[in-house]
Amino acid sequence: MYDREHTAVVSHDEQMNLVAHTPKIAQQEKGEGILKGEHKKNIAVLDGVRACAIIAVMAFHINLMALNDLWDLPHHPFASALATFGGSGVTLFFVLSGFLLFLPYARALLFQASWPSARQFYLKRAVRIIPAYYVALFLIVLIFQQKYLQPDRWKQLSLFLVFFMDSSRATFRQLNGPFWTLAIEWQFYMLLPLLALGFLLIARRLPSLPGQRLFVMLGCCGLVIVWGLVLRLLGNSSLAQHQTSLIGRALLIFLYGVQGKYLENFAIGMIICLCYTYAWHAENGVIIRQRFRRATLLLGAGGVALLLFTAIWHFNVLHMQLPIFAFMDILTPQFNWLNEMIIAVGYGSCMMAILFGPVWVQSLFAWRPLCWIGFISYGLYMWHLPLLDFFNHKILPQIPAFSHVGLYLSYWLWLILIVMPIAVASYQLIEKPCIQFGSRLARRYAS
C-alpha cells in the first residue's frame, strides 16, 4: 500500500517569531510599518497551506479505507488518481519545513544579518517535536500496539525512541504509519545548521551585494537537490539494496534509509525562502515583488499542472495500470528517483503563487477555521491513522449498514468528533506549553 505522511511542525507562534526578528525593510520604501504588517500576514497564510497538507493526508488514508465503496476505481481513473494522491501532502510538509526553518539563515546569508544560534535552533526543535511525539508514541503502544512491550520488540521500539525508524524495514511505516516521516524531519533538523554553515563559508567569499549572493545561494540549494537525487539513484540500485559490508550498510542507513532522506524536497523550500527573503528585504524589493506578483498566474497554473501530472503518474505506477494511462509507462523506470522532485516543484510553485499572489488568494488560506486546523496539525498527523484504524476495525462493524456515501462520511464524522479533540488536547496541554518553555529558555541562553 502506498503510504506517505508527514507534518511540518513549525507552529504559528514560531512563524511570527521568525518574522519578528527580520531585519528592517529598506528605508527607501514608503509606509514601512504597513509593509512589515503585510509581510507578517503574508507568512501567516502558510498556516492555511499546512492545513491543506494535513487534510490531504487524512483524506488519503480515509480514501484507502473506503474509496472502493464509493466507486469502481478503474471506471473513474482521473477521479481515482486525485483521490489517491493525498499522500503527497507529505511533500508539501517537507517543502514548508525547508522554507520556514531556513528563514533566519537566508537573511544572514543574503544580508549579513546576525548568524542564528545553533543551540537555540536545536533547543526549539527538541521541545517542539519530542514531548508530544513521546506522549503519542507511548499511548499508541499501550492502547493499540501492545506487542511492542514484548522483549523481542524492544530493539525495534528503540529506533522509534531515537528517530531512526526510517532505517529498517522492520520499523518503516510500522507501529504508526506517519511516524517514519518524523525521522526524516528530525534528521533534517540535525543537518540544517551544518548545511547553512557550509553555505556561509561560500558566502563569505562573495561581495556584499545581496543580488550576487542570491544567485550563488540558489546554486548551493541546487547542489543539495542534486545530492538528494544522486542518493536516490544510488539507494535504489541493486548494489545498495544487497549491501553486506558493515560500512556499506551503515552508510545506507545514514544517507538513504529505506526510502530516501527527501533532501530535494527541503531544498525546494529553501529556494523559495531565498527568493521570498530577497524580495522582501532587498533595496528594490517593491519592484521585485511586483514582478513575482505578475508571474503568480503562471506559477500557480504550472504548479497545478505538475501536480495533476504526478497524480496520474502515481496512480499508474503504485495503484492501477490502466490503458488510458499507458502513455506514461515509458516514464515508470524514472519514478523512484524523480517523482518526489516533481511533486516538490509543483507544490513549491503553488506556494510562490500564494505568497506573492493577490489579496483574495491569500484570504482563502488565511481563513481562520483553516488556520486553526494548521495550528493543531501535528496532533492530527500523529493521531489520525491509529484512531481511524480503530474505527475501521472495531467500531464500524458494530454499526448497522450504511449507504456507501454514509459509510464514507462516517469516517470524517469520527475524525471531527474524536480525532480533532485529541489533537486540540495535544496542542493545548503539551505542544503550546513546550513551545513557550522553549522560547523562554532560548531567551535565557541569548541573554
Image (cartoon, rainbow, N blue to C red):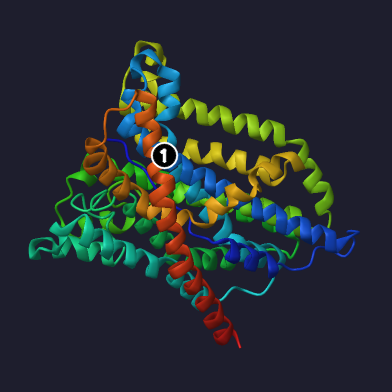
- Image height check: is 137 above or below 85? below
Which residue sits furthest front?
Answer: 400
x and y, in percent, of residue 288 in the image: 79, 47
Q: Is residue 292 visible?
A: no
Position of 325 with respect to 266 (left or right) is left
Which residue sits furthest top?
Answer: 323
Position of 143 with respect to 230 (left or right) is left
Q: Quadrant of the C terminus?
A: bottom right
Q: Amino acid at mark 1?
A: Trp
Residue that mark 1 sits on: 412
- Image height check: is 37 above or below 68? below
Q: Is residue 231 visible?
A: yes
Tag count: 1
Task: Give the quarter of the image for residue 189.
Answer: bottom left
- Image height check: is 78 above or below 240? above
x and y, in percent, of residue 310 in the image: 46, 29
Question: Which residue is located at x 71 percent, y 55 percent?
Answer: 41
Task: Give the quarter of the image for residue 130.
Answer: bottom left
- Crowdedness near tag 1: few (<14), some (14–19) or many (≥20) residues, C-alpha within 10 Å: some
Task: Give the quarter of the image for residue 442.
Answer: bottom right
Position of 297 with respect to 387 (left or right) is right
Q: Quadrant of the N terminus?
A: top left
Q: Foreground residue, 363 or 234?
A: 363
Position of 278 with respect to 141 (left or right) is right
Circle 1 SS class: helix
Question: Which residue is located at x 61 percent, y 56 percent?
Answer: 217
x and y, in percent, of residue 323 in the image: 35, 11
x and y, in percent, of residue 245 in the image: 15, 56
